[in-house]
Amino acid sequence: MKIEKATFAAGCFWGVQHILDRIPGVTRTRVGYVGGRTKNPTYNQVKTGETGHAEAVEVEFDSERVSYSELLAFFWRLHDPTQLNRQGPDVGTQYRSAIFYHSPLQRDEAEFSKARFDASGVFKRKAVTVIEPVSEFFEAEGYHQKYFDQTGGAVCHILRDR
């Protein structure tokens, strides 16, 4: 077993976590905040859009069972990466589409996958997804963890709007 990390932002983190948890080879996920300026932000701070953080999912995966490239393929299908700072009814920089890479190899794979997505013509517009090095990840409050599973997805927009 070779455990690696990936970090993705694709709008509301509840549904993203729910889907990523079901990929064979994913060993653990946690939702939180990344890419911002505030140390130890709370949900109430992040939701204002003023901390600069994105709602994100940190994924631990066994790279002998699922590759980073395969996780990227799921990422592009989880949301509409052509929408700037929004997914469905959720609007703001905290809902931006982003790939936070953990190594130069992940950066290269993310750039390649973005180019492949844009060339695919799945959407008329190009992806606005940002690709940047992962910064400190702040785990979200406990009630956000596995939220979709706790509530049956009643309030999660990412899946309802598909």
Image: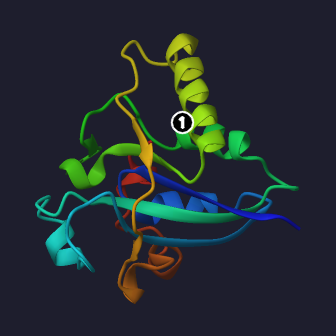
- Indicate the amino acid at tag 1: Trp
Q: Position of residue 112 (x, y in %)?
A: 60, 25
- Left or right placement of residue 80 versus residue 108 in this view: left
Residue, x 77% and y 47% (percent of image)? 67
Of the 4 image quadrants, the one containing the N terminus is bottom right
Q: Quadrant of residue 33?
A: bottom left
Which residue in the structure is indicated by mark 1?
76
Relative height, residue 138 to residue 116 (above, below): below
Relative height, residue 109 to residue 29 (above, below): above
- Left or right placement of residue 116 versus residue 123 in this view: right
Q: Nearer the viewer, residue 59 or 152?
A: 59
Q: Count every numbered label the image shows and give the total.
A: 1
Relative height, residue 59 to residue 68 (above, below): below
Q: Nearer the viewer, residue 14 or 152?
A: 14
Q: Position of residue 56 (x, y in %)?
A: 42, 60
- Left or right placement of residue 161 versus residue 148 in this view: left
Q: Nearer the viewer, residue 109 or 19?
A: 109
SS for dot 1: helix
Residue, x 18% and y 66% (percent of image)? 47
Residue, x 40% and y 44% (percent of image)? 98
Q: Quadrant of residue 5?
A: bottom right
